[in-house]
Amino acid sequence: MVPEQEIQWIAAVTAAACALPGVFLVLRRMALMSDAISHAILLGIVIGFFITENIASPLLVAAAALTGVLTVSLVEVINRTHLVREDAAIGLVFPALFSIGVILISRFAGSVHLDVDAVLLGELAFAPFNRLVVNGVDLGPRILWLMSAILLLNAAFIAAFYKELKLTTFDAALAGALGFAPGLVHYAFMTLVSVTAVGAFDAVGSILVVALMIAPPSAAYLLTDRLPRMIGLSVAIGVASSLSGYWMSYLFDVSIAGSMATMTGVAFGLVFLLAPERGLLALARRRARQRWEFAQTMLAIHLMNHEDSPDAAEENRESHLHAHLRWEQDFARRVIRRAEGTGWLSRADDDALQLTERGRAAAREAVGA
């Protein structure tokens, strides 16, 4: 493969690997935790480097993953005191750990390629230069193998513990009562999030890790209520966003990671606007339809209350609706037209409004008669 193809493969695999745990982060309302972990693990990477003095050592991944778990633990310890809310606990823990990592880099690792900009933004364009060579055989970019392994690990974990993850996500109390050990599942899952974040930000930086973990699942959440479909949509949206982001960076000669993060936002924005059931346009259409339906029901109830009464000849006329229902003349005319279209009412020879059996039944149903 040429480097351009390798970069796209890395982006697609990274997006898929991040989307899988991202689904459960979104459903558990722990999106901010991904941001906290993706920043706080810098401290683990720095400490791992100080121990191994090798920036390519697998121990850096282990140290960073442990720091991610430490972050989750500290947040929960502070949150359980009930002195601060969970979002405040996250805001307290991860800046502290991240800042310590930044200080250690600037103080003791200034000559090492472990700079803060690379950690935050990543540089996907350089990823193909770091090759995995075994017995003289070039197997491709190292990060592609690493993220492929993490993708398989995430998929295997979700497949193996799907029932436990689903139950602890939607009803942790019931999971505990059934003996599913929600605490153990939670920490195992957060360890997986930490490992994914560590592997991903070597190529794409911590900011894009957060974008790939949260934006595609959030968009998928607006498209479906079924968990398996949400997982599949999250992966598809993440991969599509990463590939379109790559080509946008190619066309405009800008940062690949920044373009990918932008496209995840664009994808979410489009879904937020156009989702068939939960998009803004769908909500606006539904509210407009409900407004007309409510008005027709009000009209049907008004006509039913006055039919066969002495004042029916006056009350059941279009011109009287303004006085009784406070409707403008044009609005009343449109409501009547819609009610006639749905077969709820008709006009008598003297232009009086008359309920049909269908309209009368709707009015009775609305008042519970």
Image (tube, helix red, strand yellow):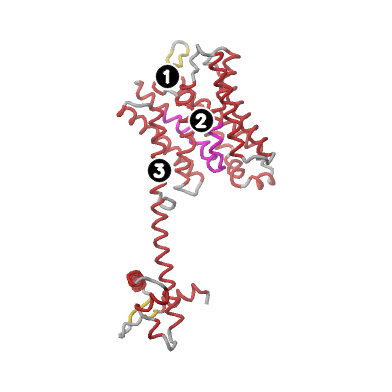
Question: Secondary structure under badge 1?
Answer: strand
Q: Which residue is at a point 53% across and 41% down the rendered structure image?
A: 26
Residue 72's place in the image compared with 286, above or below, is above
Question: Secondary structure under badge 3?
Answer: helix
Q: Nearer the viewer, mark 2 or mark 3?
A: 3
**Quadrant (top left, top right, bottom left, bottom right) of the N terminus:** top left
Task: Please report whichever mark, 2 or 1, sits nearer to the chain's N-terminal start.
Answer: 1
Pointer 1 with pointer 3, Cβ within 8 A? no
Residue 189's place in the image compared with 312, above or below, is above
Q: Nearer the viewer, residue 145 or 304?
A: 304
Going by the image, does 85 lie left or right of 268?
A: right
User: Label 1 vs label 3: CA separation?
Assistant: 35 Å
Q: Quadrant of residue 313?
A: bottom left
Q: What range of the chain is rendered magenta?
A: 11-36
Residue 12's place in the image compared with 323, above or below, is above
Q: Quadrant of residue 47?
A: top right
Labelled disc at residue 140: 1
Q: Which residue is mark 3?
A: 269
Q: Which residue is at a point 56% across and 15% down the rendered structure image?
A: 107
Q: Nearer the viewer, residue 84 or 260?
A: 84
Going by the image, does 310 lie left or right of 81?
A: left
- In reply to whether residue 336 is colored magenta, the answer given is no
Going by the image, does 61 lie left or right of 9?
A: right
Residue 185 rendering spot, x and y as whole percentages = 63, 37
* Residue lying farthest to the bottom in this orientation: 310
Q: Nearer the viewer, mark 1 or mark 3?
A: 3
* Three-letter amino acid code of the residue under disc 2: Leu
Q: Main secondary structure of the magenta part?
A: helix
Pointer 2 with pointer 3, Cβ within 8 A? no
* Three-letter amino acid code of the residue under disc 1: Gly
